[in-house]
Image (tube, rainbow, N blue to C red):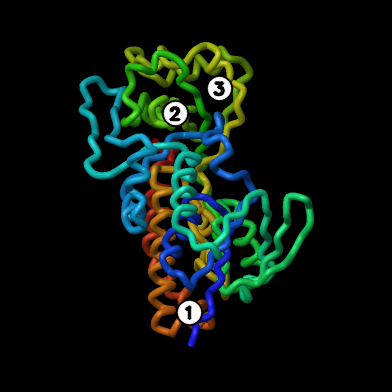
Amino acid sequence: MTQSPLRVAIIGAGPAGLTLAIALAKHPHIHVSIFDRADDHSLAPTFNPSRSYTIDITGHGTKALRYINATDRFDRELIKFKGIQIKFAPGSPKDEYHGDAWTGSRGDICRCLQDEFVARKSPESTLTFNTAVEVINPELGEIRLTNPDGTTSEAQFDLVVASDGAGSAARRQMQASSSSFTVESMDNGNHSMMLAFDQNTDGLDPSYLYVFSPPPVMTVAGAINGVSGKSTPKWFCQVGFPGAKSFATVDEAKALLKSTLPPFTSFWKYASDAAIADFATQVCIATGKAKTCSSFHLGRTALLGDAGVPFPPIGQGVNAAMEMATVLEQTLTAHLQSQDWDAAAIPDALAAFTIKWKPEADAIRTISFEGLNLAER
């Protein structure tokens, strides 16, 4: 008997959604449809000057890339990550990282993963941008699509995976649909702003993150791919605060940085007056929020990455999301294989996924939430 294909919708073409799609691509009878409301990664800018902090792909992320056999592409296209250099304590040794690791912006990472998915996907699998998706019925896997021209259509899938970020609309719909699905919110108050390092960066090694000051005002600089890729790195410094911050003048911003940074630091040589002036006008972004979901599924709908486990950025947010995607693929396919690929078994497979990943997710969130509370430093 010919096996009917399983239809999977993935909402969000971020690192988690794309990692899942690549993992599922090895199963020819699973047809994947990815939808994202933003632009095609291959055409869109890879960085946002106000948000593009450097992400290091290590640990969970490296494990996920090995699982989907994508490390060769990351070697070719992203900056290799070697470790961290502490600049606020004279004589501090480099904290070397040993093993496969890379750095880049979220856009850099998504572009690599998108290229990998396109290279591997079956003709039946699709990747659609500029399309908004609303989960109508998470129990039944029903969604509504809003196309670029404003027209709408509805569809039903065997499985819907919502990887639509920390503000997940799918998560809210799951809350509204079932009293058994609960969400607890937390906020340690942390905020951050981005400062471009736009001069004299030849003396910095893009393979390292540089910590110029510790909490309560923490400054961490790193490189992402520039306009010509990793050969022309672009530098940003993330400035973290224990609360929301704004500046009335450029001089006020300079005064705060000077009060935070040690007098011997080389920090000032990397940021021009124009870069600091731009920094002073930025909106401070909340980076201390977290949520705890009672589960990662409801019926035929699963939450992935920040949609299910949003927590403060400590270098493992994207990494954890990518490994979470591989755990979902492993749990789903193992369960379905034992049930002759019967789509009716998907809710039970998702329940097994929650049981398997939730302890890991809770542990990472606890570390990130309590370990980087700038207000307590």
Amino acid of disc 3: Phe
Residue 160 visible in the displayed image: yes
Q: Is residue 58 above or below residue 136?
A: above
Left or right: 344, with 264 as reference point: right
Mark number displayed over residue 279: 3
Residue depicted at x 32% and y 17%: 203
Q: Is residue 127 above or below residue 212?
A: below
Q: Which residue is mark 2?
A: 217
Residue depicted at x 51% and y 51%: 290
Quarter location, residue 50: top right
Amino acid of disc 2: Val
For mark 2, give the secondary structure.
loop
Residue depicted at x 77% and y 50%: 149
For mark 1, give the secondary structure.
helix
For mark 3, give the secondary structure.
helix
| Lower sequence index among marks 1 and 2 | 2
Quarter location, residue 313: top left
Amino acid of disc 1: Asp
Q: Which residue is mark 1?
A: 348
Q: Neighbour class for label 2 at 10 Å: few (<14), some, many (≥20)?
A: many
| Lower sequence index among marks 3 and 2 | 2
Camera-side residue of 227 and 138: 227
Disc 1 to disc 2: CB gap under 8 Å? no
| Lower sequence index among marks 1 and 3 | 3
Q: Neighbour class for label 3 at 10 Å: few (<14), some, many (≥20)?
A: many
Q: Is residue 360 above or below residue 300?
A: above
How far apart, in angstroms, are the residues tagged by discs 1 and 3?
A: 49 Å
Picture coordinates of residue 252 (x, y %)?
56, 16
Camera-side residue of 275 and 369: 275
Quarter location, residue 206: top left
